[in-house]
């Protein structure tokens, strides 16, 4: 291992332009002044694809836990993998989360602006910060430059596999650990690319115990891999950026996906070598899907419902989706909602210890049921407004119909929305067309054929006789009963014929309420048309 003087010289050679120290960074980002039990949580997605419903899920959890502890929620964009970043990836995340009502106290507004004093909150704009800590790690003998090429690394991997050894850069395979200063200078003078690796002092055979906020007590093996901290392009790896950003931003608890659990030994070592206080971790299980009796992760490639656009384009109520996600996070939310039907979901107390350890099943059928329940609790005006907002973006014809017939449409949407039996047949605002179609001649479907139950001549007779006594009255069904008795038919059969004549369907909302909204003139017109 290099001596202290050699490490200091090496640090200056590698980072000649870095004059600031870690102390300068801590002075720039002072400790937060919060209560002891306040949680400062960050959510740090990467702009490498569409907005995943799991991203909304994790972001929602972070914002709720921070808010209910009078803490701070932070959105941080981890964009250090430039090869995988997509165009407009950052705005997709920032605006997509806002669209779902997931608001952070600090974070980017767009790629240039942010709110909060611990920024920038986009990692590619924090490169100078990482170099300060990389230089200090080299100076302390905890990191070193590595000039191994891609070809050399591949050759090393093959040799390791042939020897039956673990693959990776560690121990005797970490050949640049002890190289002299002259050899490093020689490579630098040639302009060769290099990375900065951690000088691991761990032993993979040693174990340590940790208490995960979600998984519980875990036993893990120490890290002994000399993982890359700074890549050859100057960008940090997630492993290096995460402890630095979380410490400088005053994060109190690290909540992240459990795909990062195998990296915790490395992160533990990095916290120690950086001289930082280790933070408690909670590893969230992914959203799962049932596939032919097996459970697997909800996939970006296989499952269209993984993309939030799936829900936006169909007009799913965003608060309904959030209620379903809350129930996935804490299964007691369902019982809480039954006991508190009129209270906003924000009042529900989310608890880390109640989160699913193994991965919750994302069930589109249950999501639909939750959204039905949510929409059933809204008044007609709100359903109208939300339907119009959706239609303006995705169905011009329905949008025009709603705008040109506002009061009429609100009355339609109010059918079976009050009283003991509430209508629950609207899952998403795309379904507004189904709600309207029996009330507009240009939308109404063809008649359902019921001639196999009642022949057409008898149907016409029923409608003709009903026209003679028709009036809009709360006692309308008494007229149906009397007519059925006169004709020697059941009231159910007579009502079914009238329902088809008026709505073209054998099933519809409460027929009396439908008749009231249509009005006497339109009802008579439809009855007469049925006869003809």
Image (spheres, rainbow, N blue to C red):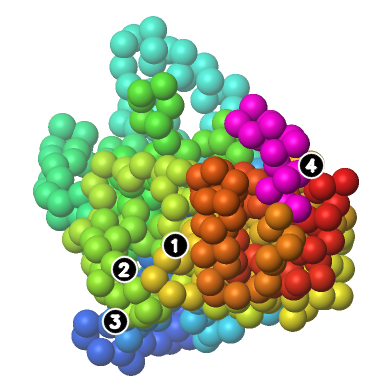
Magenta highlight on residue 459: yes
Q: Which residue is mark 3?
A: 69
Query: Where residue 12 sits in the image (x, y, percent)?
Result: 52, 62
Quadrant in which the N terminus is drawn: top left
Residue contact at pointers 4 and 3, CB within 8 angstroms: no
Magenta highlight on residue 439: no
- Which label number is shown at residue 337? 2
Residue furthest top in the image: 162
Mark 2 vs mark 1: in front: 1
Quarter of the image where one finds residue 385: bottom right
Q: CA distance from mark 3 to mark 2?
A: 21 Å
Magenta segment boundaries in residue numbering:
449-464
Residue contact at pointers 1 and 3, CB within 8 angstroms: no
Q: CA distance from mark 2 to mark 4?
A: 40 Å
Q: Which residue is mark 1?
A: 373
Nearer the N terminus, badge 3 or badge 2? 3
Residue furthest front in the image: 486
């Amino acid at each position: 291992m290099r001596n202290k003087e050699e490490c200091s010289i090496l640090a200056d050679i590698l980072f000649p332009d870095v004059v600031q120290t870690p102390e300068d960074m801590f002075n720039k980002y002072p400790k937060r002044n919060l209560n002891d039990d306040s949680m400062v949580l960050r959510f740090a997605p990467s702009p490498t694809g569409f907005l995943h419903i799991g991203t909304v899920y994790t972001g929602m959890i972070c914002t709720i836990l921070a808010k209910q502890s009078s803490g701070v929620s932070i959105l941080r964009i981890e964009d250090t993998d430039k090869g995988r970043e997509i165009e407009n990836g950052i705005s997709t995340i920032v605006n997509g989360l806002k669209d779902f009502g997931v608001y952070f106290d600090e974070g980017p507004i767009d790629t240039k602006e942010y709110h909060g004093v611990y920024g920038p909150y986009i990692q590619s704009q924090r490169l100078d910060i990482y170099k300060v800590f990389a230089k200090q790690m080299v100076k302390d003998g905890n990191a070193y430059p590595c000039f191994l090429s891609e070809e050399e690394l591949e050759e090393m991997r093959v040799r390791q596999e042939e020897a039956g050894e673990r693959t990776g850069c560690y121990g005797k395979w970490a050949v640049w650990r002890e190289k002299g200063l002259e050899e490093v200078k020689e490579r630098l003078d040639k302009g060769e690319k290099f990375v900065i690796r951690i000088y691991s002092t761990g032993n993979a055979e040693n174990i340590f115990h940790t208490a995960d906020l979600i998984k519980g007590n875990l036993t893990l093996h120490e890290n002994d891999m000399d993982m890359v901290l700074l890549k050859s392009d100057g960008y940090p790896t997630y492993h290096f950026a995460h402890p630095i950003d979380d410490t400088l931003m005053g994060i109190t608890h690290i909540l992240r996906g459990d795909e990062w659990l195998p990296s915790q030994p490395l992160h533990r070592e990095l916290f120690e070598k950086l001289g930082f206080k280790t933070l408690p971790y909670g590893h969230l299980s992914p959203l799962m899907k049932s596939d032919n009796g097996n459970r697997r992760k909800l996939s970006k490639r296989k499952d269209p419902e993984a993309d939030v656009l799936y829900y936006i384009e169909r007009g799913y109520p965003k608060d309904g989706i959030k209620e379903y996600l809350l129930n996935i996070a804490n299964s007691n939310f369902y019982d809480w909602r039954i006991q508190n039907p009129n209270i906003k979901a924000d009042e529900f107390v989310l608890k880390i210890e109640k989160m699913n350890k193994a991965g919750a099943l994302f069930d589109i059928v249950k999501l639909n049921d939750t959204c039905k329940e949510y929409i059933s609790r809204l008044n007609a005006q709100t359903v109208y407004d939300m339907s119009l907002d959706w239609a303006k973006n995705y169905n011009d014809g329905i949008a025009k119909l709603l705008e040109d017939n506002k009061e009429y449409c609100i009355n339609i949407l109010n059918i079976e929305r009050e009283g003991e039996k509430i209508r629950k047949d609207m899952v998403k605002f795309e379904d507004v067309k189904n709600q309207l179609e029996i009330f507009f001649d240009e939308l109404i479907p063809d008649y359902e054929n019921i001639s196999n139950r009642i022949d057409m001549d008898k149907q016409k007779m029923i409608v003709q006789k009903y026209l003679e006594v028709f009036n809009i009255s709360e006692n309308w069904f008494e007229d149906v009963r009397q007519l059925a008795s006169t004709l020697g038919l059941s009231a159910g059969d007579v009502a079914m014929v009238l329902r088809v004549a008026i709505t073209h369907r054998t099933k519809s909302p409460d027929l009396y309420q439908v008749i009231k909204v249509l009005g006497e003139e339109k009802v008579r017109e439809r009855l007469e048309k049925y006869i003809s």
